[in-house]
Image: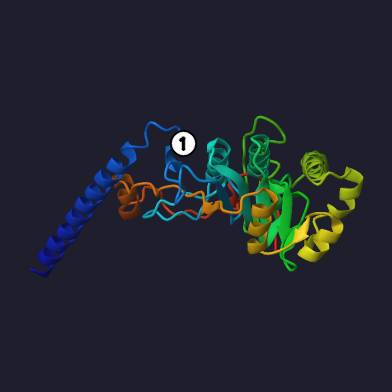
Amino acid sequence: MKKKMVLVVFIALYTISIGAAVVILATGNKKQESTKSNPMNSLTSLAGINKSEDTIGIIKIDEPIAFTSQNQNVFSKQQRGASFWLEQMQYAVTNENIKAVIIRVNSPGGTVGASQELHAAVQRIKDAGKPVITSIADLSASGGYYATVGSDRMFANPGSLVGSIGVILGGVEFTDLLVKVGIKYQAITSGKNKDMLSPYTKMTSEQRIFLQTMVDNTYDQFLTAVATGRNKSKDIIRPLADGSVFTGEQAVKNGLIDELGDFHKVVAYTRETYNLPKANLEAITPQNSAFSIKDLISVIAPNTAPTVNLIDTTPALGYSPVLYLYQF
């Protein structure tokens, strides 16, 4: 009898959850119908921005940089990560009412490609005739610094950490451990270097030289971006580009940023310098995506079993082994 009651309760709860999801899905679809004609439909509801008024747009880069963020809530469907920040930046380019952009950075960096695309997007905003001002909170290191080093002006708090100009490629190796426990690794590859970053093989001296060359090339790209963004020669930047981080005060003295100041000072500077005394100050914020049946099913019955990944030690940063990342 008790088993039957439990089964009935379970079926009732399941039915109610499915019904609620259908209602949410239907409501969300109605809200999205009005945005389908716009190619930037996820950003059509720019929170609080009056179409007839000047606006200073705010973009927050506030986590490790990668195209896909791991900090998503399935119920709110809030977008994050470099792909979303790139959408925000493109919206800033195309929206005529956004007259300037403040980028609030609090990031240790991340993957090379994502950092470079954000850097290019900052330049596109500038090319559109709109100033970009960077405000550093706690940390703007490595890829976080790379992304915004082309800004028109960079601010930081006196104790903010800035810099870490450099590249890291890391991994672990388990070969000695595998021998001890009697496990042999076997792989069929198309070339001798196909698995050179595998934790199950020893790296050869030739492979180490090859990887060092790749890291050096990526480092030179970083060095070039900083030298160009700060309007200095590589020879001046190179002594500072050994991976070291600096306080905001040190960064000003070293020429890595322009000025000390908190977010309020950055806003005041932007208003005064670019003649925007009455401009709205608004975050570029999209509507939350509707919660779908697929999302509900993924919560109730996930189709992927949990796994242990011994290779990827930084899953939030995707799959790139070469990183513009400050590790602490």
Can I make out residue 200 in this image?
no
User: Mark 1 falls on what kind of element?
Assistant: loop
Q: Between residues 48 and 220, which one lies in front from this camera angle?
A: 48
> Looking at numbered disc 1 in the image, what kind of residue is underneath it?
Met
For disc 1, the marked residue is 40
- Residue 302 x, y percent position in the rendering: 36, 51
- Quadrant of the rendering where the N terminus is positioned: bottom left
Q: Position of residue 205 (x, y in %)?
A: 83, 43
Rendered residue at 62%/34% (across/down)? 188
Q: How far across and how far down the image is residue 94, in percent?
A: 54, 35
Give me the residue at 24% from left, 44% from top: 26
Q: Give the percent coordinates (x, y) of residue 224.
A: 81, 40
Q: Nearer the viewer, residue 88 or 294?
A: 88
Residue 50 in view: yes
Q: How is the image coloured?
A: rainbow
Crowd rating for badge 1 (residues with CA inside 10 Å; few <14, some 14–19, many 20+): some
